[in-house]
Amino acid sequence: MASINRHVVSWTGTTALPGVSVHYSTGGTDATADLVTFFNAIKALFPTGLSWAVLNSGDVIDDTSGLVTSSWTGVGGGVVTATASGAYAAGCGGYVNWQTNTIVGHRRLRGRTFMAPLQSTVGYDSSGTILSAALTTIGAAATALAGSGKMRIWHRPPVGTFTGGTSALIVSGTVPDQVTSLKTRRR
């Protein structure tokens, strides 16, 4: 059993939003500033109007059971605002693959953070894939966040149980040259 901090980052301000990305860090560590740095590093690739609200507090959960055990409070946080003006396709962008060295059920534990919407002129090339400069920018930000030594991927316990969950330290983040789109389940 390990305690992990849950960081909820709200995405608002453009078509196809609001949304959230949920990040986890090692219990007892404050990753708020690391998340603010991550979003500041990539803000020039996203359309104006989009903003990320990085909270400086949240729940502490037991990674084995998924139960909330307490809360954490950090320093900093705040709102990061995107700066790229121009057209974008709502819900379309890239993603970061987060890797760990932990095996769960014969598979490597990993996570994914979707990065959408990317602004068209700084995000995509003429072949419809992600520009090399955008891949480099997001990749460097992901490498720095993984390199903080605080961020974790959480594997939830099986449905209907309060055992079998775990978490693992993120060791790297990569950004494939692959466009993806987000779909909503809301009706």
Image (tube, helix red, strand yellow):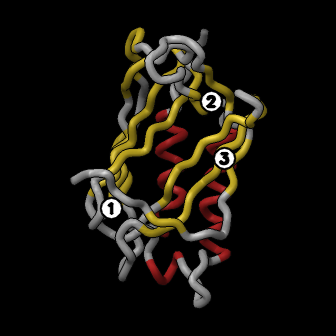
The numbered disc on residue 150 is 2
Residue at 65 percent of width and 59 percent of height: 175
Question: Residue 56's x, y, as percent?
Answer: 38, 30
Residue at 55 percent of width and 80 percent of height: 124
State the residue lying farthest toward the bottom. 126
Q: Which residue is mark 1?
A: 50
The numbered disc on residue 125 is none
**Left or right: where 95 falls relative to 168:** left
Q: Secondary structure at mark 2?
A: loop
In the displayed structure, 25 sits above or below 123; it is above
Q: Secondary structure at mark 1?
A: loop
Which of labels 1 and 3 is toward the front?
Answer: 1
The N terminus, quarter of image: top right
The amino acid on which the numbered mark 1 sits, given as a three-letter code, is Leu
| Res. 54 image quadrant | top left
Label 2 neighbourhood size at 10 Å, few (<14), some (14-19), many (20+)? many
Label 3 neighbourhood size at 10 Å, few (<14), some (14-19), many (20+)? some
Q: Earlier in the sequence, mark 2 or mark 3?
A: 3
State the residue lying farthest toward the left. 187
In the displayed structure, 185 sits above or below 45; it is above
**Left or right: where 54 falls relative to 30:** left
Question: Residue 185's x, y, as percent?
Answer: 32, 51
Residue at 68 percent of width and 35 percent of height: 109
Q: Secondary structure at mark 3?
A: helix
The Cα atoms of the two marked residues, 2 and 1, are separated by 26 Å
Q: Which residue is mark 3?
A: 144
Residue 61 is at least partly visible in this image: no
In the displayed structure, 177 sits above or below 158; it is below
Question: Residue 48's x, y, as percent?
Answer: 33, 69
Question: Residue 176's x, y, as percent?
Answer: 67, 63
Q: Observer-nearest residue: 89 or 55?
A: 89
The Cα atoms of the two marked residues, 2 and 3, are separated by 11 Å
